[in-house]
Image: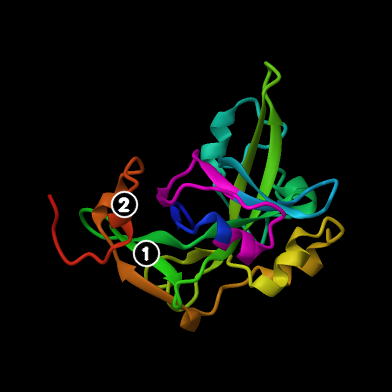
């Protein structure tokens, strides 16, 4: 699964990596949590050029009565998202990239959960496969939200968790964002575990366990107890 992640890249780097039409100016984030605003890359409906927008993490289906369902839909299983009522329309019409520099996972055991930071081995920025949706409140307010697709864990992650976020290869960004690519049989082959040999993992501070804590030391190697 993916319950927290990191995005520290500067706007210039994001614009170059994702071929954005405009240079964004995001603040570095070291512990992004569900229900917070996250950066997504999607195609502009008119120009079809890529742009970076901010939406709420936790997909709220158009038919939802309120926002609360979003906290339960931060992830969607890649194998079934095209069939599930909450994700079916978004999978067909509203796909996005969710830029990241790393994500956290936790080793389950007795006592306090130990977080790990997972990144590319070369430290490069990457993108999760995401879906986005638009929801209208009873008062007429429009909320855009997203979810991150997950797949089976690779060999690096499997000792910690049986699932991992889908990380798309750059050469597949265009297909994933293409509004004409609607068939699951075309998209599902993209949603596979990322090669373990191209990734790295390290133990980080339990401070990450607090969703309100967002500071550079979240990503630093952890060697022992802290107060």
Q: Is residue 179 magenta?
A: no
Q: Is residue 14 magenta?
A: yes
Q: Secondary structure at mark 1?
A: strand
Q: Is residue 71 left or right of residue 204?
A: right
Observer-nearest residue: 171 or 109? 171
The location of residue 130, given as percent across then percent down, is 64, 54
Q: Check disc 2 and report its element: helix, strand or loop.
A: helix
Task: Determine whether label 1 and label 2 are within 8 Å by CB.
Answer: yes
Kindly tell me whether residue 86 is visible in this rendering.
Answer: no
Spatial separation of the CA atoms under disc 1 and disc 2: 10 Å
Q: Relative to 23, is 124 above or below?
A: below
- How many residues crowd around disc 2 within 10 Å: few (fewer than 14), some, or many (20 or more)? many
Q: Nearer the viewer, residue 112 or 99?
A: 99
Q: Indicate whether 195 appears above or below 191.
A: below
Q: In the image, residue 185 lies at what x, y percent? A: 80, 68
2 vs 133: above or below: below
Residue shown at 52%/48% (left/top)?
A: 26
- Residue 206: % across, % down: 25, 54
Residue position marked by numbered label 2 in the rendering: 208
Figure disc tally: 2
Name the outermost residue toward the bottom. 197
N-terminal of the pair, mark 1 or mark 2, is 1
Which span of residues is magenta-colored?
A: 13-39
- Determine if residue 139 is in view: yes
Q: Which residue is mark 1?
A: 117
Q: Residue 172 has which mark?
A: none
Residue 78 pos. (x, y %): 64, 61
Q: For residue 142, which quarter of the picture?
A: top right
Residue at screen point 67% across, 16% down = 139
Query: Which residue: 68% across, 51% down?
Result: 22
Image quadrant assignment for residue 103: bottom left
């Amino acid at each position: 699964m993916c319950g927290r992640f990191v995005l520290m890249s500067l706007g210039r780097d994001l614009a170059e990596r994702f071929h954005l039409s405009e240079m964004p100016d995001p603040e570095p984030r070291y512990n992004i949590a569900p229900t917070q605003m996250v950066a997504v890359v999607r195609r502009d409906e008119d120009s079809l050029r890529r742009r970076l927008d901010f939406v709420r993490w936790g997909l709220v289906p158009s038919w939802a009565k309120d926002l609360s369902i979003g906290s339960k839909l931060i992830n969607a299983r890649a194998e079934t998202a095209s069939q599930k009522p909450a994700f079916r329309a978004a999978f067909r019409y509203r796909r996005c990239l969710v830029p990241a520099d790393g994500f956290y996972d936790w080793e389950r055991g007795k006592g306090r959960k130990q977080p790990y930071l997972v990144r590319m081995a070369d430290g490069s920025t990457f993108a999760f496969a995401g879906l986005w949706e638009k929801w209208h409140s009873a008062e007429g307010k429009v909320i855009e939200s997203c979810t991150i697709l997950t797949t089976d864990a690779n060999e690096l992650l499997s000792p910690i968790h049986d699932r991992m976020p889908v990380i798309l290869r750059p050469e597949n960004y265009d297909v994933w964002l293409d509004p004409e690519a609607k068939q699951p049989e075309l998209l599902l082959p993209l949603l596979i575990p990322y090669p373990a040999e191209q990734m790295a993992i390290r133990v980080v501070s339990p401070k990450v366990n607090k969703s309100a804590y967002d500071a550079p030391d979240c990503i630093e190697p952890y060697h022992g107890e802290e107060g």
